[in-house]
Image: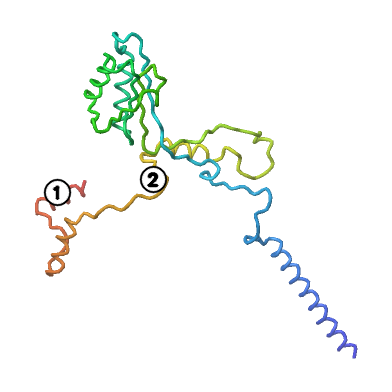
Amino acid sequence: MSDFRTRNWGRSARAIALAALVAVSTGGLSACRDDVDGAPVAGWSTIDPMVNHPIAVGVRPYQLSLELGDERQGLSRQQADDARRFFRRYRLQGATALVIDVPEHARGSLAESQVQALLANEAVPARAVRYVPAGQYGDGGSITMAFETGYVAHPPECGYWPENLSESRENVPYWNFGCAQSRNLAMMVDNPNDLIGPRRTTARSSDRRDVVWRKYVGGEATDATTTEVEQKANVSTTGQ
């Protein structure tokens, strides 16, 4: 009888120990579980630079006002240089019509004639120029020109450090994290439209494809043939 009790007690002890081990293991796993379906826990922050430091994409207006003094003097040399650079920028970046606001007292003056000559010298198409009533863009005392460019990428402002990182004990990204990456991308991008969406696919180049397809249909070899001279040149180059 004592042996039977001892064996039963040993089995019970092993069962209790196994149950306790399973409970501890399960508790540890449940403590490490991350509830991804629930709401974010307070204190969480994203580390995506494009979310924390987005790049604004929009049009940029350019405007130039040429103040007029004596009607007989016309534009100064500095004003003529400014207008020349303005027209060159329009030819490179202009996306809308070039609007020119000429006040009443400047119409037919030397200054207006100089502006017309600069437009012709800088090859600005006449169809791209639109004249508006006086005072719509300018202050009524100057010749004002304006246009808008295509999309321009505006980089975020960096360099803001609200807290001392040497005293921060939290293992979370700091505020300025990734800002330089977004700013450099905005400064280097060639076409800001790429930041808005992908480009449309262009038509394929069918010249070589048609040649290969005709050879394939005719049962010919589709690889490009090389002359004996080219083969020797390739071998000599590979040997070097």
Which residue lies at the image location 21% right of the left edge and 49% below the top edge? Answer: 238
Q: Which mark is residue 194?
A: 2
Which residue lies at the image location 68% right of the left edge and 53% below the top edge? Answer: 41
Across and down, in percent, residue 121 comes to 22, 23
Does residue 16 sit above or below 113 in this rendering? Answer: below
Identify the residue at the far bottom of this view.
1
Does residue 198 sit above or below 124 in this rendering? Answer: below
Which residue lies at the image location 36% right of the left edge and 38% below the top edge? Answer: 150
Question: Which callout, 2 or 1, points at the residue further toward the start of the chain?
Answer: 2
What's the amino acid at mark 1? Answer: Ala
Q: Nearer the viewer, residue 168 or 143?
A: 143
Q: How is the image coloured?
A: rainbow
Q: Nearer the viewer, residue 96 or 199?
A: 96
What's the amino acid at mark 2? Answer: Asp
Cβ atoms under marks 2 and 1 closer than 8 Å: no
Across and down, in percent, residue 99 comes to 33, 29
Q: Which mark is residue 186?
A: none
Q: Residues within 10 Å of mark 2 (few under 14, many from 20)?
A: few
Identify the residue at the far right of this view.
2
Determine the image quadrant of residue 151.
Answer: top left
Q: Secondary structure at mark 2?
A: helix
Determine the image quadrant of residue 226.
Answer: bottom left
Q: Which mark is residue 233?
A: 1
Q: Residues within 10 Å of mark 1 (few under 14, many from 20)?
A: few
Determine the image quadrant of residue 185.
Answer: top left
Across and down, in percent, residue 169 comes to 69, 41
Q: Nearer the viewer, residue 57 or 204?
A: 57
Does residue 200 sit above or below 96 in this rendering? Answer: below
If the image is split into quadrants, where does the N terminus sit? bottom right
Q: Secondary structure at mark 1?
A: helix
CA distance separating discs 2 and 1: 42 Å
Frontmost of labels 2 and 1 is 2
